[in-house]
Amino acid sequence: MVLALHQVIGVVRGVYKKFLFSLWLCLIGSVAYAPPNLFIQQEHEGNLTFEDPRGSVFTYYEPVEVREDLIRQTVQSLWWPDRTIYWIQRKTWYRKDAWTPLPVYAKLRYLKLLEQSLTGNGQENLCWNENVCRLLVRKKNAPPYLDDNPRMEAPPGQTNGSPRSFLFPEIITRRGAPALSVNEAIGRAERIIGETGHAGIHFHVFVRIPPERLRAQLSQLGSMLQLMNDKLYLEAARESFNNIVHPALHPWHQGRTQTVERIIREGNTQPHTPEWNSPNNEKSVNLAFRYWGMEDGMMVVSLELRGVPIPTPPPRISVVGLEEGMGSPRGADLSIARALLTQLMSLGEALLEGRLANANDEQRHFDLERAESVIRSRAERRGLRPGDYFTLAQFSRFLTGDIEVSQGFLFPFSTGGNPDLNLLRFIDRFLELSAGAKRTPNIENHVTNYKNQFWEAYRRWALEELPRVRHSLSAPRPTNPVPARCSQILEAAVP
């Protein structure tokens, strides 16, 4: 008896020692942990205005509570075939689950009823935190790297506010569980797209960097953002006229570079919110720059790839380019995303190590008066008088209906200097179309025809311009390392 008791005490003592050792390891690990200085986070936008056979946001998220009274109201609003199917499923496979068998439109109805119920009781804070939807929480079997709640983006043309909409959910990864490599990020993207259909991806390559090191590379950063955005914009413009006048993906230019320089020099502790109405904001481009404030004495910035061409079910708006794609729901081709993300990670590494190369590329200036002057000079050489053709501003208004000239129309004229042969050919074709439109009666009936012809001319110009931009990106350039004294000061700051 005494021997048995002695053995039990020995076992308990051993378990206790192992527990203390494990606790010590956890404490040491939490103290020694340092967040990575280069990592990837991603956002996956969805659209519930049509059902995707791959799934939806409800694959990973469920309501914070399922109330029988609201379920009854929701079921009563179902179309009778759906109500019959729901009743059969509840009697067979989902006896204890009233939520899962609901069709997507009914789940949206339930969320609206739950929101109204909580708001009516003065508990609106339980529903929303800005655009974070607290009504939905992550399921236990969902990937652990996802945020606890999804976000709900405002419908196109609206801003986030009241009334809220559940139609455009956004699945994002947690800050505490970033992807540390391109392969890891792509693997996450493939899984999320395959299980939810959320193919509108925004990749963020985050860099935590000492302020002095970042400020020492401002000119190099601006030139690289210019060149990489030139490439992405030209590649998108050759695919569709809609990408020339895209409302959220514009070309990069000197005004955006100046915005980035101002943000970094100010070095505020809080994130910078872009001014959407400003033509110089740093986000409305294919490769955006974002400033997220200070963290442990380090500046936190990100290079945001705001979309990739991924096959999705046919969208309501036929746009082919970097943010919205067309194709079949067979799966996602992430090869282009992988290549672009690899470039961004290389750029982030170079920025972090203070060896970002100087592209020495001329900054673009968007000046409507200069563009009109170049066109006018070419028209005079061709024997055209000002009243014989539409100006660039008039032709832009004719094609788009917008009073303000799209930055895409100014993009070919933005480099300065004398026009090269490629640009002259584009101007000649523009003058032909513009003069023809000026002479055409009932011109409003021919907008689509002229839009297609203008895009074809723009597309040819973009195809000729692309090799030069690609050569500038691939050409070897001397690096501009951080000055020696800065390097000595910052040696311990960046691992």
Image (tube, rainbow, N blue to C red):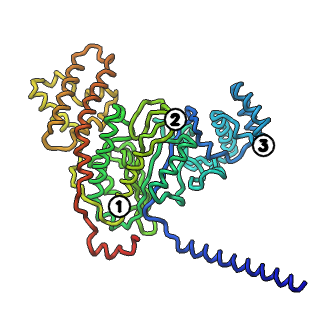
**Amino acid type for the residue under numbered disc 1:** Glu
Residue 291 image position (x, y, % from top left): 40, 56
Please name the residue shown 22% across and 62% down the image.
Answer: 478
Disc sitting over residue 431 in the figure: none
- Dot 3 corresponds to which residue? 96
**Label 3 vs label 2: CA separation?**
32 Å
The mark closer to the camera, 3 or 2, is 2
Disc sitting over residue 266 in the figure: 1
Please name the residue shown 39% across and 44% down the image.
Answer: 276
From the viewer's side, name the closer residue of 262 and 438.
438
Residue 358 placement: quadrant: bottom left
**Amino acid type for the residue under numbered disc 3:** Lys
**Label 1 vs label 3: CA separation?**
56 Å
**Amino acid type for the residue under numbered disc 2:** Pro
Disc sitting over residue 329 in the figure: 2
Residue 203 image position (x, y, % from top left): 44, 50
From the viewer's side, name the closer residue of 292 and 82.
82
- Secondary-structure class at tag 2: loop
Q: How many marks can you see?
A: 3
